[in-house]
Amino acid sequence: MVGMAVTGSGSAMPAAALDNHALSNLVETSDDWVTTRTGIRQRRVAGPTESLVQLSALAAREAIAMAGLTPKDLDAIVLATSTPDDLFGSAGKIQKELEAPQAVAFDLTAACSGFLFGLVTIAQFLRTGTYRNALVIGADILSRWVDWRDRRTCVLFGDGAGAVVVQATSDRDRLLGFELRSDGSQNDCLQLPYQGKPYHLVDEVDITQGNYQPIFMNGKEVFRFAVKRVPEAIEKALFRAQMDIEQVDWLLLHQANQRILDAVGDRLQVPSEKILSNLATYGNTSAASIPIVLDEAVRADKIQPGDVIAASGFGAGLSWGAAIFEWGR
Ligand code: UT7
């Protein structure tokens, strides 16, 4: 085994759409503000009968079919999410839904960078020959954790799931270069923190019991961070791939804000027609955003086999990273 190839993609969105006009009945905002500042017009939100496992399994089945595999062929399933149905992890339940008994399944948490971190993590198993076929899912239902009274955050996020199949290759590695980074000193810029109240258990023993608090974000800081760090990471990954930005066919960034996509494109001098975006319809779907845009562009015949993609995820942690890969076998 010498490497890996991304051979299938899939995505699944919740049924309900929530547009900016509807949101303006909830908080003091307007379609004009949200569209101008973010590029988002609507987002999907998961209803009471939809779950993260269900959306992930739908996206996964599409990716597996496109790769020409069956779930029984899978050796590993990585679910990148910050919003599992179960805090112990949801990957195991997806494995059961898919009927993929051979696959080891585990969750990976790196917020909006999760899918990219998952892709690079699983690539190492494929490169060493440990596994042959794997599934990387990015899925989030942030609507569960958004403060729907906070206009600074509730207009940004949406729910969804995306998945890719990655396979070991014996000829050539299609993962051409990557860079993964973290900066915990800026952790307080974007959080979904546990907050517990002290609880006296027994004798001298005190614990805490509590819940997770809604998403908090210092939008300006995260914006500044993204516009600086994302181009750096892509340049580092390109350097490792021994490639120039001109050789990249598609810039596939985490969908956080159209102004971030434009600014990164400007810094790297990538023309706008090479920058993939579906922010207008889905908003920021966290770990799901990269595989959802990828799947859309593949199914629209925009991305062709052999195309070079520069992908970058960034978000809470703070964490960020980039991967340069060729689509297809
Ligand atoms: O996925 C994880 C990564 N996340 C990101 O990358 C997000 C990065 N940050 C951003 O995308 C932008 O910072 C935001 C879209 C979150 C905010 O845009 P901004 O241009 O930085 O706006 P701001 O926070 O500076 O707010 C400008 C004004 C404020 O009013 P004042 O204080 O100037 O009077 C806000 O209160 O806009 C106000 N505002 C709103 N007005 C209407 C904030 N949110 C809204 C809103 N509707 N939804």
Image: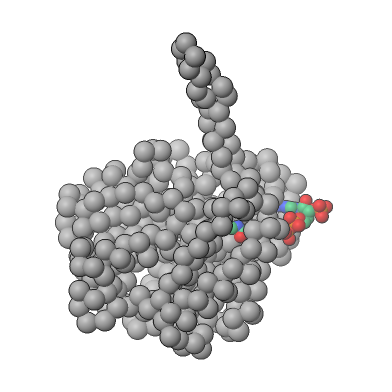
Task: Write the residue at 59% across / 68% down.
Answer: 229
- Return the residue nearer the eye: 77 or 38: 77
Q: Is residue 79 above or below residue 279?
A: above
Q: Is residue 13 left or right of residue 20?
A: left
Q: Is residue 92 left or right of residue 245?
A: left
The answer, for residue 62, to whether it is visible in the render is no
Q: How many marks?
A: 0
Q: Position of residue 102 (x, y in %)?
A: 17, 52
Q: Position of residue 118 (x, y in %)?
A: 38, 59
Q: Is residue 297 above or below residue 25?
A: below
Q: Quadrant of ligand 1?
A: bottom right
Q: Is residue 223 left or right of residue 106?
A: right
Task: Write the residue at 43% across / 85% down.
Answer: 242
- Return the residue nearer the eye: 262 or 244: 244
Which residue appears farthest toward the top when viewing the image? 203
Task: Write the residue at 47% across / 53% down.
Answer: 110
Q: Is residue 117 above or below residue 47?
A: below
Which residue appears farthest toward the front when viewing the image? 204
The answer, for residue 88, to whether it is visible in the render is yes
Q: Quadrant of the N terminus?
A: bottom left
Q: Position of residue 205 (x, y in %)?
A: 48, 17
Q: Position of residue 158 (x, y in %)?
A: 54, 52
Q: Quadrant of the C terminus?
A: bottom left
How does the figure colour the protein chain or chains? one colour
Task: Write the residue at 53% across / 78% down.
Answer: 235
